[in-house]
Image: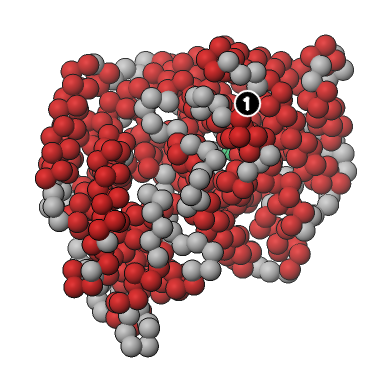
């Protein structure tokens, strides 16, 4: 049916004032703080090298990771994990328990070292049951729970460990039986989102604050975590100011008022996706990308009539900038903003890496808009696809393949032809990243999207196809999320990876950041108190 009036997303104006952003200015940009941080890094490297107990070494590595500062110690961490793996200390039965075994299992697997799930066998009873010997060991069961998310296809005992450790921990919380307050916080947090699914830098602030309630934290560790957080935040603020100026100068917020005006939220995606401080320019470019994807997504999902969306998609497929005269004015503006951005990105890569990628970028956008157009057709004709039909289109329409294309070309130097070929052919790691992003997005945004009118999403397609209730359908989607993570884990263990470590990390972090953004509803388009607090403490307020 053709709408008599256009839909609206009823999106509120941005929460973050342009002048407030432009006035951001952190003392931590001063060199004296970076010098102090370097001194602390040197001291901590000595602590790491001086630690001979393998469990303490692993606990230090775990803390460095959750506090967001492990990137200073990649070499030391690599050395320690490889020697623990080679010396197989984590296998000597007399030396270990559930806690140390699970901690070693998780950190070694995360590092790409393929430890067998059999490491838990010696802890089981005669009937081969691990759950029978948990006793009252909440600390150990929490580590087992975290470790179970590193499972790959067919590792049923890890899947069973996830189920019974979840039930064990939930019961402990419900019966208020966890006396240690910090442990209780960790359990509550991880039951919502396990460490393996948590994006590192955005979550670091929570772990830094939580450290204040721990007696076993090395003061140098906490001092460096706070200082590093504030120094990196100062760099983030400068990047955000630049993107915010670009968005204002584009005048797209005024000319396309129906679209989500979300510069800060779009920048936050890239704090999760490209957390390494040296990726400042890539973060600025991928934030512009997220902004344009958000606007064009809203043209297809909210504002454009069926006929207009088909005209826009044809123009994108043809890519003839002289032939847009027939488009409505708002589409001409959007088309040119996109064309300018593609040229800006392609020019940068041509100058820096000597590779011409205009066709790659246009193809990626063409695939995205074709998927958008299909969804618009389904909406306007009132068709509800099967879940399979929907996923075949929606893993593309969530835009992960476009986002990861830009990430690839921005951080790969040199650009390897085999990797570029796999990127163009949507290597499985791209599809898995897209699936986590899509499923997390549908769980977080579809209630609002359906209210205003949008194509039925994964939950609704499953309900329509099977007659399931909303709860059952949401549970099914969460099961699909777990299966996708299992395939992602499998892919990351492949011996000869086609893509760089940083790219593989970004592909997984895109999905992780989606689970962070949508943890409490639609943190991107609607926002909520938790997301506002996260943005305030992550970007606007240094740690005191
Ligand atoms: C960056 C994004 C992941 C992409 C554009 C904005 C998003 C936050 C999401 O927005 P949404 O409207 O929920 O996407 P979809 O459901 O219309 O595909 C799709
Ligand atoms: Mg949308
Ligand atoms: Mg959409
Ligand atoms: Mg959505």
Of residues 73 and 12, the one drawn nearer to the viewer in this rendering: 73
- Residue 342: percent from the left, percent from the top? 65, 19
Q: Quadrant of residue 297?
A: top right
Of residues 293 and 14, the one drawn nearer to the viewer in this rendering: 293
Q: Quadrant of residue 280?
A: top left
Residue with the mark numbered 1: 292
Left or right of residue 144, residue 512 in this image: right
Q: Which quadrant contains ligand 1?
A: top right
- Residue 228: percent from the left, percent from the top? 25, 31
**Residue pictured at 49% horizontal, 69% vertical:** 155
- Quarter of the image with the N terminus in it: top right
- Residue 162: percent from the left, percent from the top? 43, 68
Is residue 156 positioned above or below 112 on the image? Answer: below
- Residue 518: percent from the left, percent from the top? 51, 47
How many C-alpha atoms fall within 10 Å of the one at disc 1: few (<14), some, or many (≥20)? many
Is residue 125 positioned above or below 239 on the image? Answer: below
**Residue pictured at 42% horizontal, 25% vertical:** 279
Q: Residue furthest bottom?
A: 126
**Residue pictured at 74% horizontal, 35% vertical:** 367
Q: Quadrant of residue 25?
A: top left
- Quarter of the image with the C terminus in it: top left
Q: Determine the secondary structure under disc 1.
A: helix
**Residue pictured at 61% horizontal, 30% vertical:** 417
Of residues 155 and 148, the one drawn nearer to the viewer in this rendering: 155
């Amino acid at each position: 049916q053709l709408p008599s009036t256009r839909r609206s997303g009823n999106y509120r104006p941005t929460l973050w004032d342009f002048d407030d952003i432009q006035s951001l200015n952190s003392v931590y940009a001063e060199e004296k703080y970076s010098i102090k941080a370097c001194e602390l890094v040197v001291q901590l490297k000595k602590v790491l090298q001086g630690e001979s107990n393998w469990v303490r070494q692993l606990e230090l590595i775990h803390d460095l990771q959750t506090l967001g500062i492990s990137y200073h110690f990649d070499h030391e961490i690599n050395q320690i994990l490889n020697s623990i793996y080679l010396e197989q200390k984590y296998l000597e039965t007399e030396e270990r328990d559930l806690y140390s075994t699970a901690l070693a299992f998780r950190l070694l697997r995360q590092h790409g070292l393929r430890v067998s799930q059999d490491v838990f066998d010696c802890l089981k009873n005669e009937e081969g049951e691990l759950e029978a010997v948990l006793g009252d060991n909440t600390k150990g069961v929490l580590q087992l729970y975290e470790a179970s998310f590193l499972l790959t296809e067919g590792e049923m005992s890890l899947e069973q460990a996830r189920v019974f450790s979840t039930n064990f921990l939930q019961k402990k919380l419900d019966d208020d039986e966890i006396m240690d307050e910090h442990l209780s916080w960790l359990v509550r947090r991880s039951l919502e989102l396990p460490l393996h699914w948590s994006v590192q830098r955005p979550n670091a602030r929570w772990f830094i604050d939580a450290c204040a309630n721990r007696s076993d934290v090395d003061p140098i560790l906490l001092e460096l975590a706070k200082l590093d957080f504030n120094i990196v935040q100062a760099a983030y603020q400068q990047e955000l100011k630049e993107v915010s100026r670009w968005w204002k100068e584009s005048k797209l917020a005024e000319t396309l008022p129906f679209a989500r005006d979300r510069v800060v939220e779009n920048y936050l995606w890239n704090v999760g996706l490209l957390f390494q401080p040296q990726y400042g320019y890539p973060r600025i470019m991928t934030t512009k990308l997220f902004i344009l994807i958000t606007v064009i997504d809203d043209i297809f999902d909210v504002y454009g009539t069926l006929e207009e969306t088909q005209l826009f998609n044809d123009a994108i497929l043809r890519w003839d900038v002289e032939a847009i005269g027939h488009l409505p004015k708002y589409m001409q503006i959007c088309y040119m903003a996109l064309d300018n951005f593609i040229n800006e990105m392609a020019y940068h890569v041509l100058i820096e890496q000597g590779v011409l990628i205009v066709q790659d970028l246009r193809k990626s956008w063409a695939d995205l808009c074709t998927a958008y157009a299909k969804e618009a057709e389904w909406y306007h004709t009132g068709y509800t696809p099967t879940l399979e039909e929907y996923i075949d289109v929606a893993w593309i329409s969530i835009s992960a393949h476009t986002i990861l294309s830009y990430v690839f070309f921005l951080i790969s130097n040199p650009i390897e032809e085999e990797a570029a070929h796999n990127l163009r052919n949507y290597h499985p790691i791209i599809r898995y990243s897209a699936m986590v992003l899509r499923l997390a997005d549908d769980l977080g945004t579809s209630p609002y999207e359906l209210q205003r009118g949008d194509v039925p999403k994964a939950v609704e397609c499953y309900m329509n196809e099977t007659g399931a209730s909303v709860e059952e359908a949401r549970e099914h989607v969460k099961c699909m999320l777990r299966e996708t993570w299992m395939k992602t884990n499998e892919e990351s263990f492949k011996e000869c990876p086609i893509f760089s470590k940083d790219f593989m990390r970004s592909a997984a972090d895109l999905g992780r950041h989606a689970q962070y953004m949508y943890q409490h509803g639609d943190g991107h388009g609607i926002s909520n108190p938790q997301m506002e607090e996260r943005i305030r403490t992550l970007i606007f307020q240094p740690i005191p």
